[in-house]
Image (tube, coloured by chain):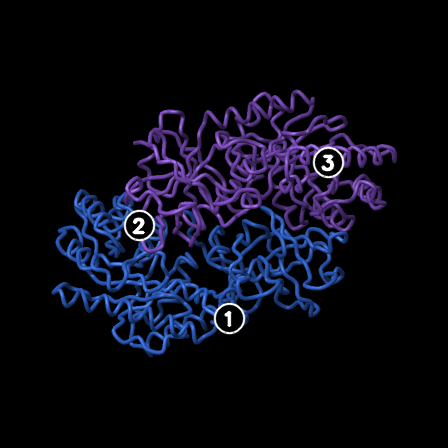
Chain colours: A blue, B purple
Amino acid sequence: MRIADLETPALVLDLAVLERNCAAMAERAKRHGVRLRPHIKTAKSAEVAAIATRGQFGGLTVSTVAEAAYFAGHQFRDLTYGVGIAADKIPALAAIQREHGATINLIVDSVAAITAVAANAAKEQSIFPVLIEIDTGGRRAGLDPEDPELLAVAQAVAESKSLKLSGVLSHAGHSYHAHGSNEIRRIAEQERWGVVRAAERITAAGLPCETVSVGSTPTAVYAERLDGVTEMRPGVYTFFDLDQVGLGVCTEQDIVVSVLATVIGHNRRSNRILIDAGALALSKDLSASEFTKDVGYGLIRPVRGAVLPPVHLFVAEVHQEHGQVAAAYGEPPWDDLPIGAKVRVLPNHVCLTAAPFDRYHVDRGDGLAKVEWEKIRGW
Amino acid sequence: MRIADLETPALVLDLAVLERNCAAMAERAKRHGVRLRPHIKTAKSAEVAAIATRGQFGGLTVSTVAEAAYFAGHQFRDLTYGVGIAADKIPALAAIQREHGATINLIVDSVAAITAVAANAAKEQSIFPVLIEIDTGGRRAGLDPEDPELLAVAQAVAESKSLKLSGVLSHAGHSYHAHGSNEIRRIAEQERWGVVRAAERITAAGLPCETVSVGSTPTAVYAERLDGVTEMRPGVYTFFDLDQVGLGVCTEQDIVVSVLATVIGHNRRSNRILIDAGALALSKDLSASEFTKDVGYGLIRPVRGAVLPPVHLFVAEVHQEHGQVAAAYGEPPWDDLPIGAKVRVLPNHVCLTAAPFDRYHVDRGDGLAKVEWEKIRGW
């Protein structure tokens, strides 16, 4: 069977492009002399993780307990849980450490969190390495590098018998809103400077700080230097998407995953073509519209081997399982997209688009639906 | 264990409110003398379907092949597939009809779709009842009630040996954007008039038209008369959400499902409280903001038994697994929501919020985590 004949909606993954993106990021990490710990929340797949960690030390970043359990069960035993940890998750994470011989690095940014986490870890007789989250401008979570609280937090970790102070970590999430590569370079340096400064303060206080971790795809791609940094944790580079194209971090040819959909209707009164991929299959994320006009919930592209006329087609509106495709100007090409025709939708923000699917249909260059990769979802 | 102690994010369902909402809609259907075929794409759960069909004929509306298979496997054998059908789904739906003795009513709005669907149904030696979709103002899918094409479509279904013309169907999706109950009443009458008019034209042409189906929660709640209609298919009324509150279709006390989340950080520089429910657990749907200020990705409410000060708190920003809670004015109540505290998030649009979860934690009034209902997800 051809991929183009699959029941829809379905996630299609271009293997050659995935391998190219992963090799390019591995090369960047090597050039900077840092370890690469891919954030696998984008792909949620052991096969993707295997490619993304080729030639690397094998560590991953995860964002849910379900991902931690799945990847530990697939031989990825050095995990960083990339969301400030809630103490109630400690029993589940301790079980994963025990059952799989895994190490799960936690992140915290307050003494209150440390106290609760340490108490639960002690109850589980489990020891967790801990990274202190540093805010390098993203203004989401983390302590300012110069925050007086930083040393109190570091001290609290160091004093706990069930925790082990292992370093500092930052995510320059504001790089996703940068306009132009110069601004991304500036943010990358801000991210680097912030964690290195925090690490210096901790070390100067006589405490350990082995890991100095940064991570976002835009800063990983544009960073000019990573002196003092020991690892990076980009994620979306594995797949890329229209948001990253808009940011100038990649081109459309670097996008790995698209949603296969079927034309289910022509609405000539509203100049819309209906497809069977809607809000659940594409997500309602509109990030790319910060940079790009007429991108909607995704851009329409032909399936492998097919050709579409050069009309700018995008998913202008979504309902739960319906997508409405519009042309940027005038009518859509009705005759080129008859009822039953298949199209691919390039994702606006692939982390959210891929999340609800339970498998990738892997295109190895022949367009044949022979290989499926399962993935984890949920929490 | 108390529901408030569950690992988060988790979906919590208030059983008493669910039963009240379902009983109220059943009563409306009875008053109008129409059958109730709940759209179960909101809940995706056999237990919810059992409550929603109490005292009814047992038919359901579904929106994916996965839902069709799941509900047919749970004794719900009269299903309407509520999205214009793609012929490639016929083999899977035919298998469900065969294996479960189910009947799956399909919807179409073009001769092209009928031709392809009939051919695949014939290959499967399966017969499908077919409803013709009518556009009564929603401008998504369907034929205008006066469209000359309508009779050609009806004729094409009637002539096919593998299809059986069973009626007409409409979804007044534009009721979701109505301002005020008078406008919803007007749309309900427009929806009723449109399908009844289409049914009259089909019947006048000597063709069968047994089912005359309307359906949207706002129009189901506000319809003054449903003369000529035989069934209604509302869905979101089972759970309700902030979008429906904004529309004036329900009050906050009618909301059944909320997302349990844990406070994982305090960001005093940005006046934000971080929780572990983000874009995946809440969805990025912002429908309710069409009607309501400061609703964001959901409103913050205490867990059962707890109290919060009267500060308007909402999820102002989401990342994949982080939510940022803000107060409408000034600082959030830091001391009332310490690190580790649990909150409930009322969903902006519950169909999308509930979709990725695999279970409901059912609160039967005691706040205890004793009952879980599994649900289907994906396609």
Amino acid of disc 3 = Glu
Label 3 to label 1: alpha-carbon separation: 46 Å
User: From the viewer's perspective, is A290 left or right of A200?
Assistant: right
Q: Position of residue B71 (x, y in %)?
A: 55, 35
The residue that disc 2 covers is B265
Check the residue under mark 3 and report the chain it is in.
B
| Along the viewing direction, whichever of A26 and B200 lies nearer the viewer | B200
User: From the viewer's perspective, is B128 left or right of A378?
Assistant: right
Q: Residue at x 48, y 32 (%)?
A: B256
Which residue ends up furthest to the front in the rendered image?
A: B330
The residue that disc 3 covers is B191
In this rendering, the answer to whether B199 lies above or below A236 is above
Q: Secondary structure at mark 3?
A: helix
Q: Secondary structure at mark 2?
A: strand
| Disc 3 and disc 1 in contact, CB within 8 angstroms | no
Check the residue under mark 1 and report the chain it is in.
A
Label 2 to label 3: alpha-carbon separation: 48 Å
In the rendered image, which quarter contains the N terminus of chain B?
top left
Q: Position of residue A16 (x, y in %)?
A: 49, 71
Q: Residues within 10 Å of mark 2 (few under 14, many from 20)?
A: many
Amino acid of disc 1 = Asp
Q: Residue at x 71, y 47 (%)?
A: B139
The residue that disc 1 covers is A254
